[in-house]
Image (cartoon, rainbow, N blue to C red):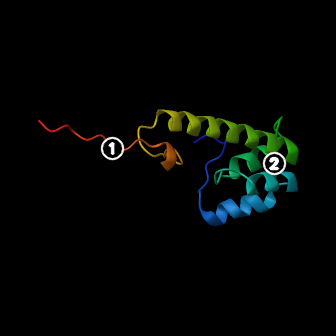
């Protein structure tokens, strides 16, 4: 196994411990996030001093980038959905009545 990115268990307890060790700006970004992102990889990069992860604001920008990609992916899935998918149901006032077969 490589020690480059880390290998850790993703449990609620471990996630919250990593969350508590992040800078305040990064914690705010995680608290307001669209999904429940795992903070450990970002904490590892922060502790190692990697470029782009040295402050809470930089970590928040990385998380905002993840959020933007996730929103775009969800929007694409919503557009291609054939049925109701996460809010893709049509409004009742614009729905057409069901078609009926004509009598022969």
Image quadrant in which the C terminus is located: top left
Outermost residue toward the bottom in this view: 13
How many numbered marks appear?
2
Mark 1 residue crowding within 10 angstroms, few (<14) / some (14–19) / many (20+): few
The answer to whether residue 55 of the structure is visible from this angle is no
Residue 103, image x, y percentages = 15, 39
Which badge, 2 or 1, comes first in the chain's sequence? 2
At horizontal 86% and vertical 52% (from top left) the residue drawn is 25
At horizontal 75% and vertical 57% (from top left) the residue drawn is 31
Specify whether 37 is left or right of 23: left
At horizontal 55% and vertical 33% (from top left) the residue drawn is 76
Q: Is residue 89 above or below residue 11?
A: above
Q: Is residue 10 above or below residue 94?
A: below
CA gap, disc 2 to disc 1?
60 Å
Marker disc for residue 55: none
Callout 1: helix, strand or loop?
loop
Q: Nearer the viewer, residue 79 or 63?
A: 79
Residue 55, image x, y percentages = 88, 45
Which residue matches tag 2? 47
Specify whether 15 is left or right of 20: left
Image quadrant in which the N terminus is located: top right
Q: Nearer the viewer, residue 93 or 6?
A: 93
Q: Is residue 1 above or below residue 36?
A: above
Residue 94, image x, y percentages = 49, 42
Marker disc for residue 98: 1
At horizontal 62% and vertical 64% (from top left) the residue drawn is 12
Q: Nearer the viewer, residue 52 or 100?
A: 100
Outermost residue toward the front in this view: 103
């Amino acid at each position: 196994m490589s020690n480059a990115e880390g290998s850790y268990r993703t449990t609620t307890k471990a996630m919250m411990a990593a969350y508590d060790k992040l800078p305040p700006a990064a914690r705010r970004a995680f608290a307001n996030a669209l999904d429940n992102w795992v903070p450990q990889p970002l904490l590892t990069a922060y502790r190692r001093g990697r470029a782009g992860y040295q402050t809470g604001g930089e970590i928040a920008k990385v998380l905002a980038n993840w959020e933007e990609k996730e929103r775009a992916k969800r929007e694409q899935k919503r557009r291609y959905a054939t049925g109701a998918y996460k809010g893709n149901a049509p409004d009742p006032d614009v729905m057409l009545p069901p078609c009926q077969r004509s009598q022969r």
